Amino acid sequence: MEARHSDARFDALVRDYGRLIRHAIRRAARADAPRLADDIEQTVLVSLWQQVAREQVIDHPASYVYRAAVRETVRAIRRDRAQSAGAEPAGAQVEQVMTGTTPEDNVRRREQRDALRASLETLGPDRARAVKAHLSGFSVEEIMALCGWPYQRARNLIARGMADLRAALRERGMP
Amino acid sequence: MTTRPGASLPGDDELRQLYREDVGAQSSVAVHPSEDDWIALTSDTLAPDIRDRIADHVVGCAECAAIHRALTDLRREAATIDPEAPPLAEVSSPRWPWYGALAAAAILVVTLGAALLTRASRDTTAAPAPATVSLGPGPVAPRPGQTPAAPSASVVAPWAASVVALDVRLPAALVMTLRGEAPIEAARRAELVRTLRPALDLYRGGEYEPAGIALATIAQDAPDVPEIAFYAGLSHLLAGNASASLPLLESAVASDLVGDDARWFAAIAHERLGAHDRATEMLRALCARGGSRSRDACQASSQLPSR
């Protein structure tokens, strides 16, 4: 095992994955993530090696490191979100948007959200999934990866779903 | 977004803002996907119903959306360093063949125009016409995955006028730790990977001339890895040096990974060097082979002029 783990190529693969995780987290995590990037990379590398050290024999090191990298990415983002949650109370984003508006504005905004939610419920499951993913800000590639759809299917579901959504919103008085 | 009575919701951005507010206003009590769920999702091994359930959760959960974005980035990048990482499905427009045909037509027009201008210029200066066409260094080719480049002036056939830089694919054995491998062989492979990395970085960075030189040097010492010769040849071709690319590409046709690509680019190199008959012969063989470049080759063969 020692010889296996000291293999330079395996070291390099783990280091490369550590770098990739760092980049992925910098892009996906909240605004203060870049400040934490060095800490995150160190934590990820240590955790990756701890996972590797627990295994006696790794038959497919590359795919093993890939799975470990996915696991560490999930943990790092959850840690980041948990830390951020302490500084930003739940619902703060909504309150922030509504700051400076009148009570009537707030009521109207809530009605619009209700209309959007009700309109989404009228869509078929795949179209609703595609539209929600689109409205969440996912790219087509991210939607394909999430839902397992090929490119053309993803694009069609988004386009048709958005058309259905707009029609449903119009029926609810939001032309 | 305005909240006045009768206001419309014209743009996707405004709907996104409203949707995010709605998601943010709801307290999520659903169970988040486990780490194993994420591993299965990013390895495409989830049952469809479970995948749908997880997708439904992710699109309404800000934390899970952040995780999914990060994992998609990780997966895309992992494919460049790890042949065993599950690849992402290709994002490509089905209208590309139509744009491709338009681009080929545009290239043909430009090529004919350039040839006519060249001939007019030669007529006025009475300079002797060259026996073979030299493309010279040509324009800077795109980086892997970017838009194809076309030579600025040539009389090559349209199918050989543009070269696309391919993403790097190397055999898994090059980067995998194998059971029972002799230490001396492992050390040799480790050294090969160490020297290969900066050369491939040049290629990925679009510096094709130095990449071609560096990769060709490495390929000489690693004849058992024909993929290195392939990227050396492709780099030379992208740098506009068809004569340097040809022997390297021809030595890479034995590769299971890039053999058909090597044949295709070798045919382009022949065409660019004026060996039209040899290029045509290679195209027809590639078309009949039924491999990954068969469609391109058959299409190019069908458009060949009678020479």
Image (spheres, coloured by chain):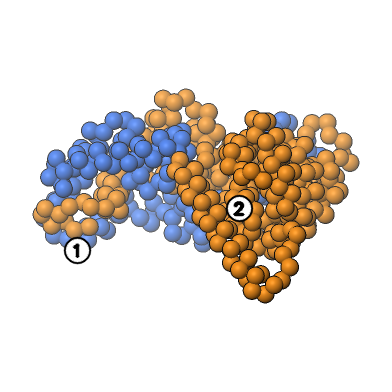
Left/right of residue B192 with respect to residue A98 in the rendered view: right
Residue assigned mark 1: A100
Please state if A99 lies on the left or on the right of B278 as rendered: left
Is residue A82 positioned above or below B173 on the image? below
Q: Colour of chain A?
A: blue
Question: Is B41 on the left-hand or right-hand side of A2?
Answer: left
Question: What separation in Å lies between label 1 and label 2 (alpha carbons)?
Answer: 57 Å
Disc 1 chain ID: A
Q: Quadrant of the N terminus of chain B?
A: bottom left
Question: Where residue B290 sits in the image (x, y, percent)?
Answer: 64, 30
Q: Residues within 10 Å of mark 1 (few under 14, many from 20)?
A: few
> Picture coordinates of residue B271 (x, y %)?
70, 49
Q: Tell me the kind of residue under disc 1.
A: Gly
Chain B image colour: orange
- Given the current orientation, which residue lies at the most extreme right position? B184
The relative height of residue A100 versus residue A132 in the rendered view (above or below) is: below
Question: Could you say which quadrant of the image residue A53 lies in?
Answer: top right
Helix, strand or loop status at disc 2? loop
Number of labels in the image equals 2
Label 1 SS = loop
The residue at which mark 2 appears reads as B162
Could you tell me which residue is drawn at 78 percent across and 44 percent down? B250
Residue type highlighted by circle 2? Ser
Residue drawn at point x = 44 percent, y = 26 percent: B48
**Residue B200 position in % (x across, y down):** 71, 53
